[in-house]
Image (tube, rainbow, N blue to C red):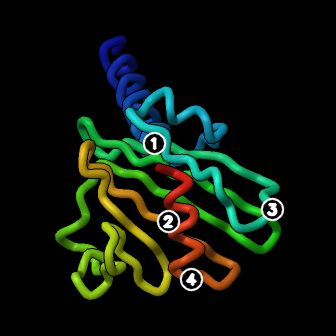
Amino acid sequence: MKKRKWSIGFILFAILSILVLNVPLIHYPVWVPKKFEYKDYHATYIPFKVTDQYATIVTCGRNCSQVHYHYKNDDKHLSVLATDKASWSSDAIWQRKNRVPGTNYYYNSTQLAWIEEDTEVEVFIKLEGQKSDVKTLLNVAESIK
């Protein structure tokens, strides 16, 4: 009987651990992911007044993580996602027609993306609540590097 109680408790602990590590429940200050990742991907240029900013960290497998930075006010939301998970083969943004001329950036109507060559980290920037033009997103991207 004791063996069964221990195994049920262990299973519940394992399920809870997976949920905590794979669901972005915890909102960290934007400086915290720098302690867990090789590079800090938080933006220093935000095209609106920020009232709330936080980061979430989710694991996506062994040696893989996703750090999602959020900058918000009442009606605008800027998000920066940095991930080790490779999407270049399946995501439509990586098509040649979406490349910003003369740069390593890719842009479609909703987001800007690029791949960090040295770490192979994919970075996505999305702006909601205001007109999202390529120049604004490029300014945000330059503030990250």
Tag 4 residue? 133
Q: Secondary structure at mark 4?
A: loop
The amino acid on which the numbered mark 1 sits, given as a three-letter code, is Leu
Q: Foreground residue, 3 or 78? A: 78
Look at discs 1 and 2 and give the one toward the viewer: 2
The amino acid on which the numbered mark 2 sits, given as a three-letter code, is Ile
Q: Mark 2: few, some, or many residues within 10 Å (few <14, many ≥20)? A: many
Which sits earlier in the primary sequence, circle 4 or circle 2?
2
Which sits earlier in the primary sequence, circle 2 or circle 3?
3
The amino acid on which the numbered mark 3 sits, given as a three-letter code, is Lys
The amino acid on which the numbered mark 4 sits, given as a three-letter code, is Asp
Which sits earlier in the primary sequence, circle 1 or circle 4?
1
Measure the alpha-carbon separation of dots 1 and 3: 33 Å
Q: Which mark is residue 125?
A: 2
User: Dots 2 and 3: beta carbons under 8 Å?
Assistant: no
Q: Foreground residue, 99 or 61? A: 99
Measure the alpha-carbon separation of dots 2 and 3: 17 Å
Question: x, y percentage for residue 10?
Answer: 37, 23
Which sits earlier in the primary sequence, circle 1 or circle 3?
1
Q: Is residue 70 found left or right of 108 in the rendered image?
A: right
As drawn, which residue projects farthest toward the front? 102
**From what the image shows, is residue 12 above or below residue 77?**
above
Q: Is residue 43 found left or right of 39 in the rendered image?
A: right
Question: x, y percentage for residue 63?
Answer: 25, 36
**From what the image shows, is residue 51 above or below residue 57?**
below
Tag 3 residue? 49
Measure the alpha-carbon separation of dots 4 and 3: 18 Å
Residue drawn at (62%, 65%), measured in percent from left and top? 78
Tag 1 residue? 19
Question: x, y percentage for residue 73?
Answer: 79, 64
Look at discs 1 and 4 and give the one toward the viewer: 4
**From what the image shows, is residue 57 above or below residue 97?**
above
